[in-house]
Image: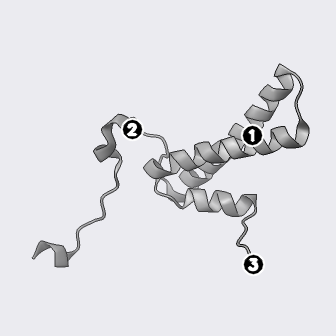
């Protein structure tokens, strides 16, 4: 048996990932959607290919917007990957850690 998610399930999975780490998944989701649409529709012109790419990107944007709506946290920040320590999410220290 295989575990499979529908589009809604994938979007829920993506939105559950803390925002700095979710961006690669959103990009992946946009790429996979665009590739799938291209294989299904076989666009033969620039305009048709551009339409497929826009629709694929809309899937990622929908995931971002749903994440922001659900968590109240912006998914995009001014930080970038060259400052990796700033992107890492630190777990709050518990009282046990302070001893």
Looking at this view, is 74 or 15 the one in front? 15
Q: Which mark is residue 81?
A: 2
What residue is drawn where x is 89% and y is 25%? 44
Residue 24 appears in the picture as rendered = yes
Image coordinates for residue 19, horizontal then vertical, percent = 47, 51
Q: Which mark is residue 8?
A: none
Looking at this view, is 8 or 65 the one in front? 8
The picture quadrant where one finds residue 40 is top right
Label 1, secondary structure: give it.
Answer: helix
- What is the spatial separation of the Cα atoms under label 1 and label 3, in whole angstroms? 27 Å
Quarter of the image where the C terminus is located:
bottom left
Please name the residue that numbered disc 3 is placed on.
1
Residue 50 lies, with reference to residue 39, above or below; the image says above
Image coordinates for residue 43, horizontal then vertical, percent = 88, 30
Residue 79 appears in the picture as rendered = no
Q: Which mark is residue 34?
A: 1
């Amino acid at each position: 048996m295989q575990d499979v998610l529908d589009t809604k399930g994938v979007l829920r999975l993506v939105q559950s990932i803390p925002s700095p780490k979710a961006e690669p998944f959103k990009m992946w989701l946009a790429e996979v959607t665009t590739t799938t649409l291209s294989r299904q529709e076989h666009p033969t012109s620039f305009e048709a290919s551009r339409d497929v790419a826009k629709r694929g990107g809309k899937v990622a944007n929908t995931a971002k917007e749903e994440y922001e709506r659900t968590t109240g946290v912006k998914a995009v920040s001014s930080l970038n990957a060259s400052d990796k320590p700033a992107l890492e999410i630190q777990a709050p220290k518990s009282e046990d850690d302070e001893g």
